[in-house]
Image: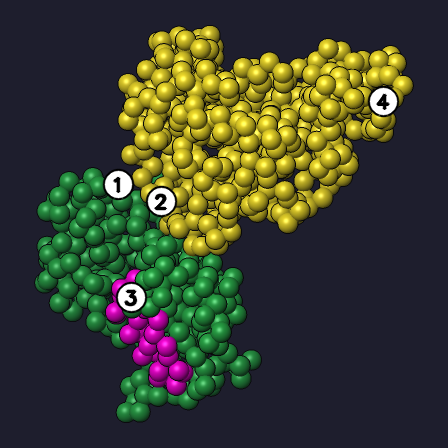
């Protein structure tokens, strides 16, 4: 047994990044060898996993997960949320700060980090709140969270926008001292009062208050300019509009330190689904139009958008079994993310599997300043990896999900692929599609 | 016809004409000394009102009672709804009571869609948020048809009813707060279905984005629209819209978009003036206009009962003997 408790494994015949089949030897929590020498490197006692036809990817990293604990354990816990993450192929998730109490002190972020360690299904990296209580009034103790055992590097008031320009500027500046990044939920609050769905043809027809694209784009433009002005790192959460893509492309062309994420649901779903008034499609930012989806896919393919992040937002049934306006915003996503990206990006020819590995593992790990994740499948790397079968096509069954909540917008929809196995530093967390 | 009436888009041209023709026949019965028909005896109609709307509720209640249905009024005030019961639990309660039809008024757009998933009976939308109010559109179409002499001349329900006409070629101008109006949405759909040319007139702040995709045309200038209108429908303006910067003041709104006597004089000779009520006299409509012979406001109320009778009759299978 290795120090990491996973023993040695010989993964036979997997296709690293979708390429030619090769054996992968795992030992002591590390990738010991890839290719002809893998068996020897793994050693004679290695357990053998037949992975013929499976695609091997570095373990996926999610920058945007709502684990709901502490406070809303009826929706999700660190235990159930990280089980869902492992089943979705993730080896690290960033837990958003809008818990009860808010993750705005070293004490709370350390609690979440410890719960993640105890659960053991994947690494849990707490995101710290930018402002105390997410109230948008004064900065939380960002340095204390950065220095805590949880080593917080990403700070976000996600769910709320840091709309005050001065506060945003100060936050961007302050986190430079410990190489932090501010992840902005871009939503101009006055332009989105009472907003229910994307403002456009559908909102007009359905009589629902619109959430205009400009409310996202105006904040993104302002924050790119602020980040440039103070020379800081800005990350943009769940980018949802074609206009946002144009602004980010421009900011990157200037060499500014701006990164961005897109969710699987914004890559696949459009606002005409709201015509059913089924709140399973209610999410913030809202589902947009087919033109936005096309722009987001193109931006993820060309690197303007750096990565995919789930915005996994579990809610109990009663929060969705209501009329539209009374329902909560949010969708689950951890257990369907890779399959959704497969359909939106790989089946369309926009990304190959190396591209998927980059956008779902290497780049998010770099943005989160994670040293042990997103590494290439090469000797010496941490043996955190995902084995994915691209062959099956099955309908999504929420009842089978490990998440405590069932609010997936893909229920009943056929998606390609299946996560077969996930390894975290040499230890299987998922085998044969089930928790190991 | 569909089992439910949730949107005016649920009605094909034939469906809509069938409702109007049936309403014509039922209106004739309403002129008799004994107004009641036994058609829906033993059926239960629930009026589920989450918003105050006495006029719509009593219109549906009168319609159901004239067809001999049992009527249960379920209002949010003084019921479990006020204590926070969910729409789903309310729906399951009504289902357990055996409601054959649920007439729902709700402040949330789409509430009737949700309700229809939880009850077996027919769901009739009596106004949901800023979405739709299809029976209002039907009674407006019915009123227009009567005023322009295009109604049917049949003998009675189930008999050899004559076919009334469409609204082909009639020019209908709807004026006011289109953005928040369920009456406007249902009317644009239904009047278009029936062949009318619909024009929306409003300040740009009170038009939805992408309104150019609707089956109608748009103008910001009421004076330009009036001479080419056979029908002008004035919408109620909520005075609190002023506070959200939709327009500067009530007086400015009234000057630019209110229908006063001088503006009414620009209308063609046979043109009529409609209002779904309740009116803000002196704001969107001057008292002299509201009380003029062109005004159909009182007829609209009377016609509302006939049209709602027709809807209940057709949705609840009262027409099963028909071909």
Q: Residue at x 43, y 20 (%)?
A: A145
Q: Which mark is residue A209?
A: 2
Please tell me how crowded label 1 is: few (under 14), some (14-19), or many (20+) other residues with Cα within 10 Å: few
Please tell me how crowded label 3 is: few (under 14), some (14-19), or many (20+) other residues with Cα within 10 Å: few
Residue stretch rendered in magenta on the structure: B50-75
Query: Residue reaching furthest bottom?
Result: B33
Which shade of the palette goes to chain A? yellow
Residue behind mark 4: A46
Q: Which mark is residue B77?
A: 3
Q: Is residue B280 left or right of residue A420?
A: left
Q: Residue at x 31, y 91 (%)?
A: B34
Question: Distance between the Cα atoms at labels 2 and 3?
Answer: 25 Å
Question: Distance between the Cα atoms at labels 4 and 2?
Answer: 59 Å
Question: Distance between the Cα atoms at labels 3 and 1?
Answer: 33 Å
Please tell me how crowded label 2 is: few (under 14), some (14-19), or many (20+) other residues with Cα within 10 Å: many
Q: To which chain does the residue with label 3 belong?
A: B
Q: Which mark is residue B205?
A: 1
- Please provide percent x and percent y for residue B126: 36, 65
Q: Quadrant of residue A265?
A: top right
Quadrant position of the C terminus of chain B in the picture: bottom right
């Amino acid at each position: 047994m290795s120090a990491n408790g996973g023993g040695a494994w010989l993964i036979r015949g997997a296709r690293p990044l979708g390429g030619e089949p090769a054996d992968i030897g795992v030992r002591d929590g590390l990738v010991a060898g890839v290719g002809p020498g893998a068996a020897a490197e793994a050693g004679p006692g290695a357990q053998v996993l037949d992975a013929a036809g499976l695609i091997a990817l570095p373990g996926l990293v999610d920058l945007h997960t709502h684990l709901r604990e502490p406070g809303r354990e009826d929706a999700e816990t660190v235990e159930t949320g990280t089980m869902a993450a492992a089943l979705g192929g993730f080896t690290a998730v960033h837990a958003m700060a809008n818990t009860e109490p808010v993750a705005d002190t070293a004490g709370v972020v350390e609690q979440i980090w410890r719960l993640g360690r105890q659960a053991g299904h994947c690494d849990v990296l707490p995101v710290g709140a930018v402002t105390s209580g997410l109230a948008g009034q004064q900065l939380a103790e960002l340095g204390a969270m950065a220095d805590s055992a949880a080593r917080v590097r990403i700070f976000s008031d996600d769910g709320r926008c840091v709309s005050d320009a001065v506060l945003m500027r100060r936050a961007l500046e302050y986190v430079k001292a410990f190489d932090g990044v501010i992840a902005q939920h871009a939503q101009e609050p006055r332009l989105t009062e009472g907003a229910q769905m994307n403002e456009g043809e559908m909102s007009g027809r359905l009589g629902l208050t619109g959430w205009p694209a400009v409310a996202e784009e105006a904040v993104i433009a302002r924050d790119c300019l602020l980040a440039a002005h103070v020379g800081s790192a800005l990350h943009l959460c769940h980018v949802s509009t074609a206009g946002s893509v144009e602004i980010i492309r421009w900011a990157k062309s200037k060499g500014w330190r701006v990164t961005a994420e897109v969710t699987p649901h914004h890559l696949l779903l459009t606002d005409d689904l709201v015509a059913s008034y089924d709140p399973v499609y209610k999410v913030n930012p809202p589902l947009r139009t087919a033109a936005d989806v096309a722009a987001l896919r193109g931006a993820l393919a060309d690197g303007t958008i750096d990565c995919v992040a789930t915005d996994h937002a579990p809610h109990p049934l009663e929060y969705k079994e209501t009329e539209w306006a009374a329902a909560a915003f949010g969708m689950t996503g951890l257990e369907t993310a890779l399959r959704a990206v497969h359909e939106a990006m790989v089946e369309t020819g926009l990304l190959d599997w190396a591209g998927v590995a980059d956008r779902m593992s290497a780049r998010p790990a770099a943005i989160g300043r994670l040293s042990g994740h997103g590494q290439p499948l090469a000797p010496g790397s941490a043996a955190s990896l995902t084995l994915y079968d691209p062959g099956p096509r099955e309908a999504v069954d929420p009842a089978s999900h490990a998440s405590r909540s069932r609010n997936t917008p893909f229920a009943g929809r056929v998606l390609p692929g299946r996560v077969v196995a996930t390894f975290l530093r040499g230890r299987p967390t998922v085998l044969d599609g089930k928790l190991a | 016809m569909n089992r439910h009436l949730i949107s005016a888009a649920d009605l094909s041209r034939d469906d809509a004409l069938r409702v109007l023709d049936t309403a014509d026949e039922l209106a004739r019965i309403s002129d008799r000394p004994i107004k009641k028909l036994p058609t829906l005896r033993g059926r239960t109609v629930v009026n589920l009102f989450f918003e105050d709307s006495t006029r719509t509720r009593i219109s549906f209640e009168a319609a159901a009672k004239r067809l001999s249905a049992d009527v249960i009024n379920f209002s949010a005030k003084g019921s479990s709804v006020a204590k926070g019961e969910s729409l789903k639990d309310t729906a399951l309660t009504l289902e357990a009571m055996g409601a054959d039809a649920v007439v729902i008024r709700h402040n949330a757009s789409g509430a009737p869609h949700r309700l229809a998933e939880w009850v077996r009976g027919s769901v009739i939308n009596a106004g949901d948020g800023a979405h739709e109010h299809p029976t209002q559109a039907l009674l407006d179409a019915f009123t227009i048809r009567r005023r322009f002499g295009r109604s049917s001349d049949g003998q009675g329900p189930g008999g050899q009813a004559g076919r009334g006409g469409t609204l082909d070629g009639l020019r209908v101008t709807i004026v006011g707060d289109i953005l928040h109006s369920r009456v406007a949405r249902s009317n644009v759909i239904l009047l278009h279905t029936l062949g009318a040319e619909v024009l929306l007139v409003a300040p740009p702040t009170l038009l939805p984005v992408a309104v150019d995709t609707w089956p109608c045309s748009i103008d910001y200038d009421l004076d330009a629209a009036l001479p080419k209108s056979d029908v002008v429908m004035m919408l109620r303006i909520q005075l609190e819209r002023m506070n959200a910067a939709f327009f500067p003041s009530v007086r400015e709104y009234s000057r630019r978009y209110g229908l006063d006597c001088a503006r009414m004089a620009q209308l063609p000779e046979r043109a009529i003036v409609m209002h779904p009520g309740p009116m803000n006299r002196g704001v969107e409509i001057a008292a002299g206009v509201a009380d003029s012979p062109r005004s159909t406001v009182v007829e609209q109320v009377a016609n509302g009962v006939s049209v709602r009778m027709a809807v209940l009759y057709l949705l609840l299978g009262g027409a099963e003997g028909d071909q």
